[in-house]
Amino acid sequence: MNVVFRLAARAHRPLAFLLVLFLAAAPAVNAAPAPDSFADLAAKLLPAVVNISTTQTIKSDKDSKDDQQGSDDSPQLAPGSPFEQFFQDFLDKNRPHNSQQESLPRHATSLGSGFIIDPSGLVVTNNHVIADADEITVTLQDDTNFKAEVVGKDSKTDLALLRIKSSKPLPSVKFGDSDQIRVGDWVLAIGNPFGLGGTVTAGILSARAREINSGPYDDFLQTDAAINRGNSGGPMFNMGGEVIGINTAIFSPSGGSVGIGFAIPSNLAKPVIDQIRQFGHPRRGWLGVNIQSVTDEIAESLGLDKPRGALIASVQDGGPAQVAGIQPGDVVLSFDGKDVADMRHLPRIVAETPIDKTVKVKVWRKRKELLLDVKVGELKDSDQQASASSKQAPPPPAGTAVKPLGLAVANLTPELRERFGLTEDATGVVVTTIDTDGPAAEKGMRAGDVIVEVAQEEVKSTSDVAQKIDNAKKAGMKSVLLLVDRQGDLRFYALKIVKG
């Protein structure tokens, strides 16, 4: 740095003088020094971290197609593979032929980690560590074993709470504030990798708010501290000895640590664990909407200054949103005073809101903000989500071309309803063909989609669609927003308007 300044001073002394003054006035970056050792902290925390082993009984059934085809021990080969018969002969040769041996149950075991959060013996771990287990054993640092019972679990956040009974208080740790830790801060991970027992690794927080498509509330912390198989459910600590994450997953082509591990933030986990502790299961707030992301094109078509918020694609009949007056096409900008930066944030904010609480919801509708009062309901687990597929049919008539969008539409007729498997209550105009090089194809629209609205106005005929597109072009809009019904699933598409 001195050499650079010297060279600059020779070429232009006033410039060098200004640079020195600027650097002198710039605030210093106060980075925390690397600790000389983690030994004291590790010694304090290790007794509260436990190893978890589970046993699951797998019943053998020689007549079970699932057991023969889906066993984890069997090689997964495509039908017709040249090795298929080779492996089948090998397995038949080594499979026990005694009917009594075949009927004996097999026992599968797995290993994981956890940590004690209460001296009475409450243990936090991942749901996937103990899922389907017949027996759960918790082992302390001093090798004391306890049989554990499941207090409750939650598959959506992959969390579980166990209870062990001890005659004396157990060492425990507390949750910290995961929102306070910054990218670059030191973290400590402790767990049971590969069944080796209490293992300590250190690293930094690499990133925040990672989405790895594991569930509806993805908001993972990323770290380069070594996390391997068996670390699942173990704690991630800050330098104050507080749990700021639960180690859950790794990204690894090899199966071992490559420095990309993921942890559930404590601020997401703590409310879930508290509710499981109190009720035996999580109680989540419910709004009753289907949402989607606000893209650049959608933001432009709605008059938003930038992509933000969560776009309401549909509202459920009788749900809190419908009762409060929230409509498809609204963009939720804030919920209960919390900004909704993008679609991912809304489900978590709603889920963490107390049930029956009335909150203020700010939405963007018709190019202006609107404030609504919503009474939050309770989310109930349900298997009522059904998928429908359109019937295979001969190519439909071409319909009326809408060249600016790269598609053709037709008015709904009994023949088209039957051809595309549309219900009698479907309203709008049906898409009959898609130009493979047009805007509609680019966004994933397809024949059989029913256009319900154009530019947030209802359409009932092909002439309505043409008129709305012309109006948008005359207004200088670069894209237009369509509300599309695909077999009962409502979704918005912002399509570019192609000139020509």
Image (cartoon, rainbow, N blue to C red):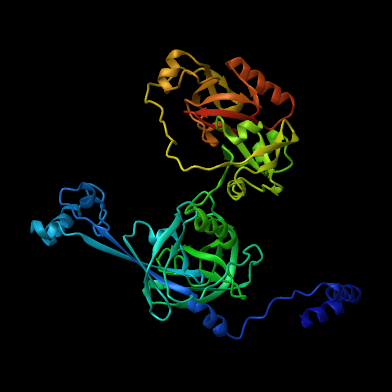
Q: Residue furthest front?
A: 167
User: Which residue is at the front of the view, 294 or 354?
Assistant: 354
Left or right side of 52 for 313: right
Q: Residue furthest top?
A: 414
Left or right side of 19 for 189: left
- Image-quadrant location for residue 193: bottom left
Left or right side of 202 for 143: left
User: Is residue 433 visible from the viewing direction of this image?
Assistant: yes
Q: Is residue 283 above or below residue 383?
A: below
Q: Position of residue 211 (x, y in %)?
A: 54, 54
Left or right side of 164 for 73: left
Q: Position of residue 408 (x, y in %)?
A: 53, 22
Which quadrant does the C terminus fall into?
A: top right
Which quadrant does the N terminus fall into?
A: bottom right
Q: Position of residue 313 (x, y in %)?
A: 58, 34
User: Is residue 329 visible from the viewing direction of this image?
Assistant: no
Q: How many marks?
A: 0
Q: Residue at x 20, y 47 (%)?
A: 65
Q: Position of residue 19 (x, y in %)?
A: 85, 73
- Image-quadrant location for residue 364: top right
Q: Residue at x 38, y 61 (%)?
A: 130
Q: Residue at x 52, y 48 (%)?
A: 216
User: Which residue is at the front of the view, 438 or 240?
Assistant: 240
Q: Residue furthest right?
A: 14
Q: Residue at x 66, y 18 (%)?
A: 467
